[in-house]
């Protein structure tokens, strides 16, 4: 039987017919090119390439990583950016931060350390005392793991665990309020983990673009100072929002702890590969945090602080932790190591390429002068003239775009726009850029908004209408929490 001309993504959802995808990816850039006839040639070509990339990312006409590579080639071919500058983005130190952190996350996943941590927490009496406790426990586990592991991998790993718990308390039914709340808490907990630089790709994009446009480098500790309050507040609000069950009989949850204890017992004693994964992660985390503490304790201008910042950047810390995984012996592995290159090749290289391509696009918008021109135009047309009005606008636009595109594509698109808006209004671009970055993680309404949403929706237990209504409310809350935290925290830090 012949297949229809439409294509299906990896998540199994139907997307636009391939022909229309390709047509849109030609028409939209062409419209942008023709409408900018009076603009300088470099800015015109950068805007056209940017339009192609955004259209392709939103329609999924090409794989996201391939779109990034094509857009980088277009920047070189059209003369919008030199070969050295365009492809130099692929060697940015932030790329190596991604590589190292992905290898560590892959080791935690392969060794089963993430599952052990999940079942260990759920085996505690307080974690399954009531449906409300289960809700908070699932959300906390998802959030904590997702601070260091991709939210997609976290959700995929935790979904079977969540369903096992729901089955144990006899509420694994489509549309059941408790079942729906637990699964929404799972996807929301994974997505709101913005408290670390490596928590999500948009965070790394934001750090790189802010450094590129302003020369300001935000370290691991600085990011956590405003990122963790947002994460913790969003987690607590999600728990309070989803724990409201009306007219639902409270099930006996004692069996949930029994299941968790049994699953934890079946994992056996801590294996060598898990121990080495913990050591590798501990090395990286220590080196990520230590320079920031030294800077705050000794002063950012002191020699020791400058030396640590220069010699042990986040990329070196991540690679040092990853190196441990390739060196320390593990008796429980055939290869006798926690990580091998064969396993490392299975990490999310596509995300890394996508990110590098986004950096090249961002660099082109600044160097061509397009960012400044667009920023001045947007500042004039929107009337946003102060840093906090622009920050609010950036957060809102990023949340809206993230409902239709991946959070990485949303951040890659909106962060340069936010910086351009700020520069056009002659105010600090850091709060608007951070608003755009964090806002791009807060798309909760649709199954297509994020990979975690799609994974949870694929379970068949969460009706789309429930996801839409709850997600819309959480979007609004996310806007308020993000804006409030940035408004209160960034000025004392000297970042506004």
Image (cartoon, helix red, strand yellow):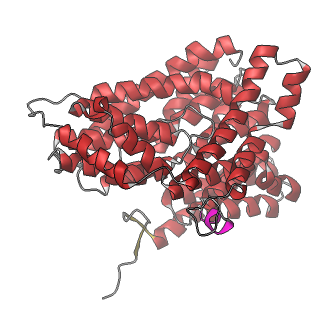
Residue 250 spot, x, y in % from top left: 12, 33
In the displayed structure, 416 sits above or below 78; it is above
Residue 35 spot, x, y in % from top left: 65, 51
Identify the residue shown where x is 80% and y is 64%. Answer: 77
In the displayed structure, 431 sits above or below 11; it is above
In the displayed structure, 285 sits above or below 109; it is above
Magenta-colored span: 341-346
Magenta segment's dominant SS is: helix
Seen from this angle, which residue lies furthest top?
A: 492
Identify the residue shown where x is 79% and y is 48%. Answer: 92
| Residue 342 is inside the magenta segment | yes
Question: Is residue 449 in view from this perspective?
Answer: no
Q: Between residue 371 and residue 491, name the one nearer to us.
A: 491
| Residue 312 is inside the magenta segment | no
Residue 208 spot, x, y in % from top left: 73, 39
In the displayed structure, 347 sits above or below 193; it is below
Seen from this angle, which residue lies furthest right?
A: 303
The N terminus, quarter of image = bottom left
- Give the number of marks: 0
Q: Quadrant of residue 15?
A: bottom left
In-image side of 212 versus 301 (left or right): left
In-image side of 303 versus 285 (left or right): right
Q: Quadrant of residue 288?
A: top right
Residue 495 spot, x, y in % from top left: 70, 19
């Amino acid at each position: 039987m012949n297949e229809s001309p439409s294509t299906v993504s990896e998540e199994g959802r139907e997307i636009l017919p391939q022909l229309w995808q390709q047509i849109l990816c030609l028409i939209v850039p062409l419209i942008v090119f023709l409408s900018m006839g009076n603009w300088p040639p470099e800015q015109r070509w950068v805007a056209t390439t940017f339009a192609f990339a955004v259209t392709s990312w939103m329609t999924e006409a090409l794989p996201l990583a391939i779109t990034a590579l094509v857009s980088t080639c277009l920047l070189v071919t059209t003369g919008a950016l030199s070969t050295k500058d365009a492809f130099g983005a692929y060697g940015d130190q932030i790329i190596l931060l991604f590589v190292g952190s992905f290898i560590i996350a892959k080791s935690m996943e392969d060794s089963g350390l993430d599952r052990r941590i999940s079942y260990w927490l759920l085996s505690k009496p307080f974690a399954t005392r009531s449906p409300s406790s289960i809700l908070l426990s699932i959300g906390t586990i998802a959030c904590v793991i997702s601070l260091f592991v991709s939210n997609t991998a976290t959700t995929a790993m935790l979904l079977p665990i969540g369903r096992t718990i729901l089955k144990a308390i006899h509420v694994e039914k489509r549309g059941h309020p408790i079942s729906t709340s637990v699964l929404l808490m799972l996807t929301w907990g994974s997505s709101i983990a913005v408290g670390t630089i490596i928590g999500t790709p948009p965070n790394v994009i934001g750090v790189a673009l802010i450094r590129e446009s302003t020369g300001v480098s935000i370290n691991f500790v600085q990011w956590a100072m405003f990122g963790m309050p947002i994460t913790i507040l969003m987690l607590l609000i999600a728990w309070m929002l989803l724990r409201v069950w009306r007219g639902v009989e409270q099930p006996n949850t004692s069996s949930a702890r029994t299941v968790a204890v049994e699953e934890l017992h079946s994992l056996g004693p801590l294996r060598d590969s898990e121990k080495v994964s913990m050591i590798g992660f501990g090395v990286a985390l220590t080196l990520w945090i230590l320079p920031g503490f030294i800077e705050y304790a000794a002063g950012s201008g002191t020699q020791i602080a400058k030396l640590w910042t220069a010699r042990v950047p986040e990329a070196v810390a991540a690679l040092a932790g990853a190196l441990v995984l390739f060196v320390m012996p593990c008796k429980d592995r055939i290869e006798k190591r926690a990580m091998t290159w064969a396993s490392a090749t299975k990490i999310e290289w596509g995300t890394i390429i996508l990110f590098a391509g986004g950096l090249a696009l961002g660099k082109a918008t600044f160097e061509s002068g397009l960012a400044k021109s667009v920023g001045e135009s947007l500042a004039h047309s929107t009337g946003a003239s102060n840093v906090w009005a622009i920050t609010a606008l950036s957060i809102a636009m990023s949340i809206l775009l993230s409902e239709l595109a991946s959070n990485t594509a949303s951040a890659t698109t909106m962060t340069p726009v936010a910086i351009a808006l700020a520069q056009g209004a002659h105010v600090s671009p850091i709060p608007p850029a951070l608003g755009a970055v964090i806002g791009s993680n807060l798309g909760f309404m649709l199954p297509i908004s994020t990979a975690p949403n799609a994974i949870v929706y694929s379970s068949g237990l969460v009706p789309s209408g429930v996801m839409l209504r709850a997600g819309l409310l959480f979007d609004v809350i996310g806007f308020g929490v993000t804006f409030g935290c940035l408004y209160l925290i960034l000025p004392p830090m000297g970042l506004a």
